[in-house]
Image (tube, coloured by chain):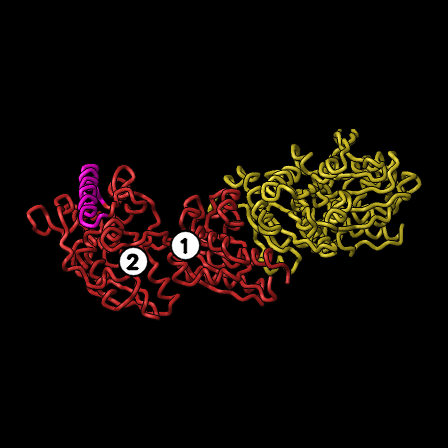
Chain colours: A red, B yellow
Amino acid sequence: MSTVPHVVVAPDSFKGSLTAVDIAEALAAGVRSAAPDARVTCLPMADGGEGTLDVLAAAWGVTPRELVTVDAVGRPVTARWLVSADGRTGVVELAQASGLVGVADVVRQPLHAHTRGTGEVAAAVLDAGVEEVLVCLGGSASTDGGAGILTGLGVRVLDAAGEQVPDGGEGLARAASLDLSGLHPRARQVRWRVAADVTNPLTGEHGAAAVFGPQKGARPGDVAFLDEALARWAGVLERETGVAVRELPGAGAAGGVPAALVAVLGAVVEPGARMVADAVGLPAAIADADLVLTGEGSFDSQSVRGKVADGIARLAQRSPTRPPVVVVAGQVLLPADQARAAGIRAAFSIAPGPTTMDELVTHTAHRLAEVAASVTALTLGGR
Amino acid sequence: MSTVPHVVVAPDSFKGSLTAVDIAEALAAGVRSAAPDARVTCLPMADGGEGTLDVLAAAWGVTPRELVTVDAVGRPVTARWLVSADGRTGVVELAQASGLVGVADVVRQPLHAHTRGTGEVAAAVLDAGVEEVLVCLGGSASTDGGAGILTGLGVRVLDAAGEQVPDGGEGLARAASLDLSGLHPRARQVRWRVAADVTNPLTGEHGAAAVFGPQKGARPGDVAFLDEALARWAGVLERETGVAVRELPGAGAAGGVPAALVAVLGAVVEPGARMVADAVGLPAAIADADLVLTGEGSFDSQSVRGKVADGIARLAQRSPTRPPVVVVAGQVLLPADQARAAGIRAAFSIAPGPTTMDELVTHTAHRLAEVAASVTALTLGGR
C-alpha cells in the first residue's frame, strides 16, 4: 500500500431511495471519517439503463442537450442527450423519448408503441459530430425490434408492396424489406455501443415479447403476435444485411432494439455497467486503488451477472494493486462465498439491526457512511 | 502477519437468542469458510453475570458441582459451582442459589430476600481447597448488602442486644456488630474477586436500593427503608473492619454484595468481562492474534464500558500484534467513530436488510457465519 491510500467509491443508485451521486457522497464521507488522509475518488455508476445519462453528464461535467421529438405513442416530448466534453462520444438514453414512464398516462399500446423518437435523438447525436454513440436501454414501452430507431435515422421499413409499414411491433408483421437510401450519412461511420443488462434472445420463450411484453401491456395473444412479428423482422434484417440476430444474446433487450442496431449499424452489445465504467474512467481509477467501495439497493445473484458490482469486480481483478471490492447494500441476499467467487471480497448491509424498509430508507445516507467507515478502518488499518 | 493467520473468536451470548458457545461456533464456521488455513481459537465469553459459570465450565472442561442450599426466600434449591481443572480457582455464581429467577414463582420479597444460599455455596468452594474464588453477580433477588453471604460463611450479624438479626435487607436495619468467630477458616486465606458490571455505590440516589430495588419488587417506601438499612450496614462493616465501602464504586451491585466481601474478605471488585477473559486465557490468545471477532446482542454505549467487547479491545491494544477487533452484533447502535475511539475497529450487524427481530433470531447462526466470513476475507485478504 502506498503512503497515501487510494479509495475508489463507485456505487450504483439505490432504486427508490438515493441517486448514485448521493450514495457516493455518503460512502465517501464515511471513508474520510475513518481515514482522513486517504485520497478518495468518487465515481457514481449506473448499469446502462434508465438514469445512466445523468450519471455520465455528472462524470463528464457536461450539460445535457435537448430535442423535441415524439414519445412511444407519437406525442411531442422533450428528450435529453449528451455529448462528452471532448466531443467524441454521444449518449442516447432510450427511456428519454421512448420510455414506458413517459406514456404511463395513457392505456398501454404494446402493439403500437415504438422507438422512432429515440432514432430522431440518435440523428441529432450524429449531427453533433461524435465518433461513438452509447445507447442506454431500459424502461422501454415498445416491442418494435428497433425498427423505430432505424426510421428515426432515415431508414424506410417496407412491406411486400413497397409501402412503408406503420411504427410499432404490429408493423413488423408486414415488413418485407428495408430502404437504406435515406439512412443518416454518419450512421455507419461511428461506433455504436449498446448497453444491455439482459442476455435474452430476440424471439422464443426467453425472447423480447414473451419475457418483457407483459409488463408493457401485452396479453397472451399479443405476445404470440409480437413474437412472430419479431421473427419476421429478424428475417428481413438478415436478408438485407447478412447479419443473423435472432439468437444473439441481448438482442431481446428493450423490445428487440439491439437486433436492428447490430444488423444495420454494426453495433456492439455489451454489459451496461462495463460501458459506463469505461465512460467515467473507472479502470484507470481502480488501477492504483487500495480499496473499492460499491453499493446497490439489493445485492443478490443478479448483482454478479453484468451489474455494477460485477463490472467493478472484474476491473479490480485486472488491477495491479488487486484492491478488495466491498459492497455496501440496502440488503445483502447473496451468500458470502458466492460473492467471493465473483470477486467481491465482502458485502455488508446498512441495516443496523431489526428495522423496516421505510426506517432504513430514512437513514440510508447516515448508515452508508457508518458502514463505509467501518470497512475503511478494517481494510486500511487503524489510524 | 505470520504465515498461518490466527483468529480469536470470543463473543458474549446474544441474550434471548444463542449462548456464547453457539455464537462462537457460528462465527468460527464463517472464519474457516473464508480462510480455511487459519488457526481459529474459540473462547466464548461472558460478562461475569448470570451464565458465566457455564462459560467457564466449558472453557476449563470441567463439570459443575452441586450443593443443596436455600434460595433467596429460604426454600431448598440445588446450586451449581465450579472448581478449575487445576483445583486452584473456584467459581460462585450468585444467581444459582440467590437469583431472582429462582423465586419468580412467589410474590417478590424485597425486604426479606437474601444471599445466605450463596454463602453456603462459597463455603463449599472453600472446603474444596481453592486459592482463589471468583464471585459472579447479576440477577439477584435481594438487597441485603451481602450479609447473607457472610452468614453462609459462618459470620453472625448481631443487633444491639447481641441477638442474630434475620436474613434479608430488613435485618440490616437492626445490625450493630459482627461475630466473626465462626467465619470459615479458609475465608481470609484465599483471594476473592468479585465481578461487577456496574459502578453504583452502596447507598444514595445511585445506590443499590434506589436503582435496583424496584426491579426486585421494592416500592418507594421499601427503597427508602433499604437505603437507610444499607447505610447502617456500611457503618457496621466499617467499624468492624476499618474498611469504608459506602462510596466504593460497584459496591451497589447485586443488592450490595460487594460491600460485605470487600470489607470482611478483602475482595477485589473488577469488571466481569476482564475477570472472565483472564479465567479463560484470552490475553495469551490475543497476544499473537491477527484478528479478534467478538459479538453481542446489542452493541451500544454500554458495550464499551466494562462489557465483553470493551475488555477485548483493551487486551488487543496491549497485544504485540495489535489485532483489529471486530464486533458482530444483532444490532449496532454505537456510532463507528465512538467504537474506534474505544478500540473497536469495526462493528457490523447481522441484519441482511429490512427484517424483524423474530426473523433475525431465526437466522442468527447463519448470518453470524456470513458476516464473519466477510470480515475475515476483508481482514486477512483473498485466498
Q: Is residue A275 left or right of residue B382?
A: left
Q: Up-down: is A31 above or below B295?
A: below
Q: Nearer the viewer, residue A59 or B356?
A: A59
Residue B50 visible to an observer of this rendering: yes
Q: Which dot marks residue A14? A: 1
Q: Is residue A11 magenta?
A: no
Residue interval drawn in magenta: A217-242
Task: Pick whichever of labels 2 and 1 is earlier in the sequence.
Answer: 1
Q: Which residue is mark 2?
A: A192
Label 1 environment density (alpha carbons within 10 Å; few <14, some 14–19, many ≥20): some
Q: Up-down: is B125 above or below B241?
A: above
Rendering coords of residue A156 (x, y %): 13, 54
Q: Is residue B359 left or right of residue B234?
A: left
Q: Amino acid at mark 1?
A: Phe
Q: Up-down: is B22 above or below B312?
A: above
Q: Is residue A219 magenta?
A: yes
Chain letter of disc 1 in the image: A
Q: Residue at x 14, y 47 (%)?
A: A171
